[in-house]
Image (cartoon, helix red, strand yellow):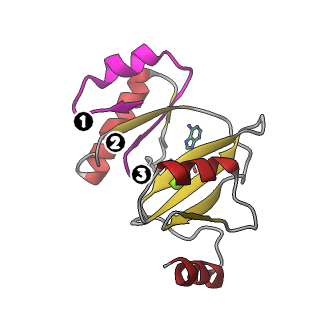
Amino acid sequence: MFLETDSNYLQQISNLNWNAYFIKDFVKSNTDAQGSIANTPEQAVKIIELIEQYRGELEGGVAVRKVEHFQPQSELRYFVMNGTACSPTSEVPAIVETVTQRIDTPFYSVDIAQTLEGKDRIVELGDGQVSERKAWPLDRFAKMLAQMG
Ligand SMILES: Nc1ncnc2c1ncn2[C@@H]1O[C@H](COP(=O)(O)OP(=O)(O)O)[C@@H](O)[C@H]1O
Ligand SMILES: [Mg+2]
């Protein structure tokens, strides 16, 4: 769920009634000792305040996600360039193809992790401004840019 900046966070998060909440603004999770996971709506509001304190302001708004358990090290970053999905391995998962068909913008990253039940989940999309290469070797990344650009 997305919350507007300065809206009634506590009420909206309480209404979700989830076991745990993953909190970030539209750009970045909270990376101090508290991290981005809250077990109560009150803790979730505290994380929003910490993000505002550390960064000066919220970027865009607040994203609240239900906490899930991902398989360790299962997250992979894909890139979509000019409508083509590119993989750091030889495979592009179906969920990345679905994203590619739905989101029409020249360049962005798509991070996918597997839940403990083996389901693919979109963890994060990025417009490239703060996205590093992650598991992509430099030459593979450069070849993608050269081929798709
Ligand atoms: N809903 C969630 N439940 C549990 N862990 C999550 C959830 N969403 C993200 N994470 C974990 O937190 C990490 C950081 O979240 P992410 O959305 O990628 O933020 P950042 O902008 O800091 O990269 C992810 O790589 C993933 O391991
Ligand atoms: Mg991330």
User: Disc 1 and disc 3: Cα gap in Å?
Assistant: 15 Å
Q: Which residue is identified by label 2?
A: 50
Does 8 appear in magenta?
A: yes
Tell me the number on the disc at residue 28.
3
User: Disc 1 and disc 2: Cα gap in Å?
Assistant: 14 Å
Query: What crowding class fits label 3: few (fewer than 14 Cα within 10 Å), some (14-19), or many (20 or more)?
Result: some
User: Disc 2 and disc 3: Cα gap in Å?
Assistant: 12 Å
First to last magenta residue range: 1-28
Observer-side mark, 1 or 2, equals 1
Helix, strand or loop status at disc 1: loop
From the viewer's perspective, is 5 left or right of 126?
left
Amino acid, disc 2 = Leu
First reached walking from the N terminus: tag 1 or tag 3: 1
Amino acid, disc 1 = Thr
Mark 2 residue's CB less than 8 Å from ligand 1: no
Observer-side mark, 2 or 3, equals 3
Can you give x and y, in whole percent of width and height, for residue 76 in the image? 66, 58
First reached walking from the N terminus: tag 1 or tag 2: 1
Helix, strand or loop status at disc 3: loop
Does 123 appear in magenta?
A: no
User: Looking at this view, is 114 or 39 the one in front?
Assistant: 114
Amino acid, disc 3 = Lys
Can you give x and y, in whole percent of width and height, for residue 133 in the image? 56, 71
From the viewer's perspective, is 102 left or right of 115?
left
Mark 3 residue's CB less than 8 Å from ligand 1: yes
Can you give x and y, in whole percent of width and height, for residue 141 in the image? 59, 78
Q: Which residue is identified by label 1?
A: 5
Can you give x and y, in whole percent of width and height, for residue 25 in the image? 36, 44
From the viewer's perspective, is 46 left or right of 103?
left
At x 49%, y 48%, the residue is 102
Q: Quadrant of the N terminus?
A: top left
